[in-house]
Amino acid sequence: MAGLICPGFLVLLVAILVLYFIEKGKRREAAYKAYRAGLANLTDDPNNPELRKRVLRLGREYSELMRGELGRTTFDEIALKNDIDAACAGAVNFHGRSIEDRLSKLQQLRADGYIDDAEYDRRRRSILDEI
């Protein structure tokens, strides 16, 4: 019986593998939650370039955990870009314009249905806070 593996060793090996996959699943779930939270923050602050970089990094970490040894693919990068662009879709670049012009443009965006009342109020407060 020297060629057979000890049953206790098999039990230990199976237990280690189960714990490994449980831990890997927890890391994936945590990475996914961090990425989704980052996208939500980016929706609230779409013109923040540092936040955008952070969300991209979080997305890449999540993609790598999902792909394992294969690493990220071009498709993953495109999916991340699409997610980030969607989170930033409400961004309007008003740089270099007067407060009056910016408020006027904001009113027009609301009137045209591009932003809702809550988004209008949030952005209006942000513009007025700059004064």
Image (tube, rainbow, N blue to C red):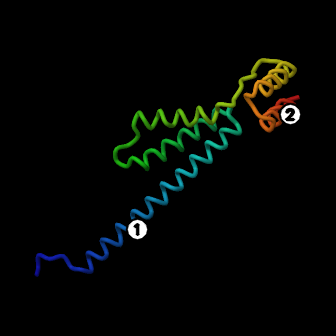
Q: CA distance from mark 1 to mark 2?
A: 51 Å
Residue 87: give x, y in percent of width and height.
63, 36
Q: Position of residue 108 (x, y in %)?
A: 80, 22
Report the quarter where the N terminus lies: bottom left
Residue 102 tag number: none
The residue that label 2 is drawn on is 129
- Does label 1 or label 2 sit earlier along the sequence? 1
Residue, x 53% and y 33% (percent of image)? 81
Give the answer, above or below, for where 59 lies relative to 26: above
Residue type for callout 1:
Leu
SS label for mark 1: helix
- Residue 114 sits in which quadrant? top right
Image point (59%, 47%), residue name: 36
Q: Evaluate if marks 1 and 2 touch, with contact meaning CB atoms under 8 Å apart.
A: no
For residue 19, which numbered disc appears in the image?
1
Q: Give the image location of residue 5, x and y in percent.
A: 18, 76
> Where is residue 23, by image quadrant?
bottom left
